[in-house]
Image: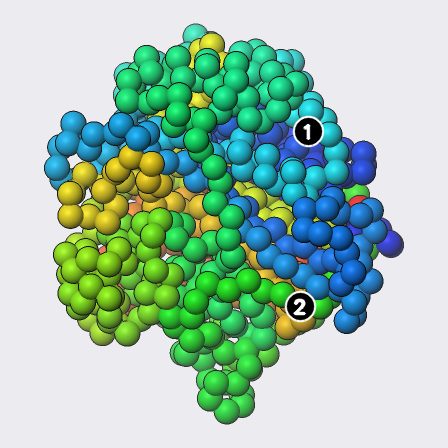
Amino acid sequence: MTAQTAAPTVGAVRAIATPHTLATEAGRQAFADGGSAVDAAIAADAVLTVVYPHNTAIGGDLIALVARTAAADAGADGDPPTSAAPAPGAGSQTTLELVDGFGYAPRAVDPAAWGTSGRVPAFGPESITVPGTLRGWKHLHDTYGRLPWARLLEPAIACARDGYPISESLRGAIDRTAASGPEGLAFVEAMFGPDWAEAEQASNPALARTLTRLAEAGPDDFYAGAVAADVLAYLQQVRPDFAAEDLADYTVHIGEPLSTEFAGLTVNTGGAPCQGFALLRYLDELGEAAEPRGAAGADGVGGAAGSDSVGASGVGESGGTGESGGVGESGGDGGSSGADGIDDGALTDAALARIWTESFAASDALRDSVLAEDTDPALLLDRSGRLGSGDPGASPTGNASAAGSAFPIGGASPADTVRPVATPPADGDTVGIAASDGEVSISLIQSLYSAFGSRCLDPHTGIVFQNRGSMFSLDPDSPQLVRGRTRPAHTLMPVIVTDPTGRPALVQATMGGKAQAQIHARLFTHLVRGGTAAEAVALPRWVTGVRHQDDTPQSVHAEEDVPAEAVAELERSSPEPVRWTAPRTDWMGHANVIDLRGETPEAASDLRADGSAWVG
């Protein structure tokens, strides 16, 4: 099996990859109308809120990482992109912006109402937080868009109004949710009707009306307008602690990415409260485990643990050529960068698997115990053992009790010493979009968290609301305690990799729930060792950690075609037998990749999803 890839056309610089063909087509149409990569990504994302309702909705959150390469004499920040890519060389500069559209708990939330231990309920109204998607789209469009706002929602409105085919991924989620119990069945019947089991098409007329109103009135109407009034009426019906001000006051967070160096490249992702640190920690450990060709500390080996959040800048352009394509091999040189400073044997599947379980078990424990919106990123990357020392200066939140409850990251095995609180298993109910236009590149991740989120559907607006609040703790001493206007820990993480000049080299986006960092590691290391984007998204995968109800932090799930040498290392590193799943399993992640390193961009979409890639 091969990935859905886009074939090249001379002179093209635009590319998009998404997990659904209808979303990719919406992005292609936006490009054809003169839109930017961000316009294409928003149009695609809006379609996904309709045709992939198990994975995303306007009742969910988003995070995006945007790289813009502009001429040195370009106008002020916020000017719309031009139609042509900047020329390469000293006259252009790349900047990175992290757009955090994570929602918060309502101001009046009372954690004691649900107890003083464990987590907020996994499903139902208690798990809902204020959705951040629409304000995230607004910031992205205001800053990087070219097309009129209403134009971006047209394909989604048509899908919701006229109907869409139920894809393989959606069908699986419908069937699993209906079989999960009476509440799941009731949700499925409300969403898809009494004939859900045999249905091949679905529609959402109420959502079509809501999207039409948002197209006409603008995205702010979701937070202070007619749509806001409808949303609030539903939320107060199921959960009275929501107030109008909780919607009206919501704003996105704008910042710089968290980064590390590996193989001569800079890997950029999201900082707290997202789990991007887990990818960077793994790459730092992998770099330390490798035998560098040059002296210790040579360029290209993993960056220093504890490095601060940085924004990459430099010279260059996203270049290349391509043509619109469906299935087929790309003509781009996807492996031109090479693994600078890394020994050839350090990136084999066996070498990756050797440190995999322990590294990601440590990061999972951090995510499920101390990761919060105010966590110091330097401490998340620090593997010296400072966390867990009881030193307030080493506490993610600045208090000794929180520091003492964390595990020592270095030294003893984290799985043996940490006391994380279990969070709901997440199958990876998220969408990831990668897009680039030669000037702007974007990795956009949007989610409901679990399948169909909270399973709360407002029949009047057609909106499904996320269950991201289930990541909050009920322990009064936990840094993850649910409090008014705080954001929970997040699994969503965008990735853009930049080259030594600062220009985008790779754009990665994936679904995968708690395993997103692991999927990104699998993608990136294959691209670094010379593979193509198509190969990277099609590789057999393995993931560790809690994926299902009976899993432990050291459980290993592997697709049946994972190479034997990697399986041997995974078996050595885990006390449990490997749990097998079929090749190209849906919940192993829907990855999308654009490789900008060669003469032509290469875009690829994962066969585990229902998507496609386009270059033109």
Q: Which mark is residue 149?
A: 1
Q: Judge whether residue 212 can be spotted in this image.
A: yes
- Image position, residue 517 (x, y; %): 43, 55
Q: Residue at x 19, y 33 (%)?
A: 111
| Mark sitting earlier along the chain (1/2) | 1
Q: Residue at x 36, y 31 (%)?
A: 129
Residue positioned 25% across, 46% down in the render: 480
Q: Residues within 10 Å of mark 1 (few under 14, many from 20)?
A: many
Q: Secondary structure at mark 2?
A: loop
Instruction: Please report contact status of discs 1 and 2: CB closer than 8 Å, yes or no.
Output: no
Q: Residue furthest top?
A: 194
Measuring from the top left, give residue 487's x and y in whole percent. 35, 41
Residue 114 falls in image quadrant:
top left
Task: Tell me, yes or no, if residue 52 can be seen here.
Answer: no
Front residue of 529/510: it is 510
Residue 254 got which mark? Answer: none
Compared to 343, does 230 lie above or below?
above
Q: Left or right: where does residue 112 sit relative to residue 485?
A: left
Residue for badge 2: 314
**Residue located 34% across and 52% down the image:** 374
Is 433 or 385 nearer to us in this picture?
385
How far apart are labels 1 and 2 at the CA level? 31 Å
Residue 59 to residue 258: above or below: above
Q: Is residue 82 left or right of residue 110?
A: right
Which one is in front, 612 or 160?
160
Picture coordinates of residue 102 (x, y %)? 43, 40
The disc labelled 1 sits on which kind of residue?
Trp
Specify the amino acid type for callout 2.
Gly
Q: Residues within 10 Å of mark 2 (few under 14, many from 20)?
A: some
